[in-house]
Image (cartoon, helix red, strand yellow):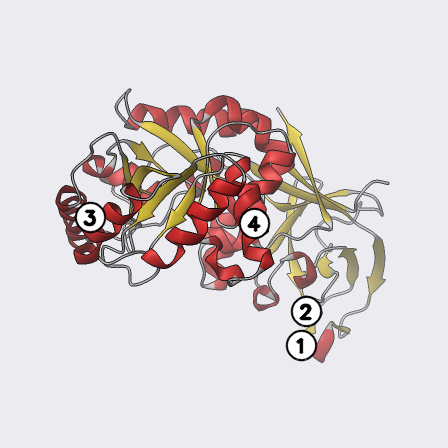
Amino acid sequence: MESYLTAQISASAIRANLRLLRQRIPRSTKLCAVVKADCYGHGLAQLVHLLSSEADSLGVATPEEAIHLRRLGYNGPILVFFSPLGYGEGPELREALEELIARGVTLTLASGRGIRAVAEAAKRVDAFARVHVKVDSGMGRSGVLPEATPALVRRIRDTPGIRLLGLYTHFAIAEEEDKAYTRSQLQRFLAAAEAAGGRDGLTLHAANSAATLDLPETHLDMIRPGLAVYGYQPSDQMQTKLPLRPALRLIGRLTQVKDLPAGSRCGYGLRYTFTRDGPVGLVPIGYGDGYLRCLSDKTFVRVRGQLVPTRGTISMDQITVDLTDVPSAVVGDEVEIISPDPTAPNSVESLARLAGTIPYEITCRLGPRIRRQLVK
């Protein structure tokens, strides 16, 4: 059955974005495309084969995402950012570690607590565990502190069944105009790596999308772009503005068209009053699909080539649009809800500014009722 809503994902846009990112880095530097949160809402199942042919490896947040990638047929390197130790110490942890290790997924360790569990799981499945160590260089989130990194690296290297393959960190404010703190994070990370024995066959990586664009010194052995892969600038403060192509176009259909007289009010709370006679239409998208309620009375969609305003409070499942300037509109007409043109009023970037958030949230919130379709 067809969906009311379709997110058209442009394969050519994603390939073009990856080419632009490749051009920013040395030939020897690898590219790990971050595909967590269903490729930032763009659809992992639709994109996995494209990304596997264009990227050197893929990065995910959770063990579940890693296993899902394997079940989709991806056999390349996977780095999972979350530690599986969140499962506790019972059977669920043992089973998760065994499956991840048996499937060749690279784990992240950020403390010594999980070393024994990982080693025992590796022994049970008769395979070595691939591991990267994450260093907290100043974000205050996950990772081992720089001063504790050498001891953790030694313990891992001394443990049978575990193969240490890399060290990495993550930047807190690489997308901001002032790069001083990001450079200080890089220096703390590199100092920790040096104190732990240097590269010595390890892959060092730190650069997210923003650092990939603005800070070539962070490229190291591998970059981890996420949002830029899908065509969005990490922020308006970027010093380098690559001609990235947004990959997503979200369309729906008018499900009802009717005339309302001037003075009619609409939506929960009756917060909007129509000032003239004219037709209105319903579009089957709402905050249940990730179209944020805080955008009520602020956005535009496109019907028959014409931008039309949304009116009233955004409901869970639908929005009301003012069709006064498109009197020929009928039920079934296509509605462009999100445009791939970054300058359009209904682009991801414009919606993020209106909502006081970032493009990441706009795409990641797009829900499962929206069909993802890979197009040229």
| Disc 3/disc 1 C-alpha distance (Å) | 52 Å
Amino acid type of the residue tagged 1 in the rendering:
Arg
| CA distance for labels 2 and 1 | 6 Å
Disc 3: which residue? 189
Q: Secondary structure at mark 3?
A: helix
Give the residue displayed 84% in from the left and 55% down from the top: 257
Closer to the camera: disc 2 or disc 3?
A: 3
Q: Which residue is mark 2?
A: 312
Please tell me which of labels 3 and 1 falls first in the chain.
3
User: Callout 2: helix, strand or loop?
Assistant: loop
Q: Which residue is mark 1?
A: 271
Q: Nearer the viewer, mark 3 or mark 1?
A: 3
Is disc 2 in contact with disc 1, using a CB cutoff of under 8 Å?
Answer: yes
Q: Quadrant of the N terminus?
A: top right
From the viewer's side, name the closer residue of 216 and 17: 216
Q: Nearer the viewer, residue 270 or 262?
A: 270
Q: Is residue 85 visible?
A: yes
Compared to residue 274, the image places residue 144 above or below, namely: above
As drawn, 23 above or below 352: above
Asked if marks 3 and 1 touch (Cβ < 8 Å), the reply is no
Three-letter residue code for mark 3: Phe
Which circle's residue, 4 or 1, is located before the other in the chain?
4
User: Which comes sooner in the sequence, label 2 or label 1?
Assistant: 1
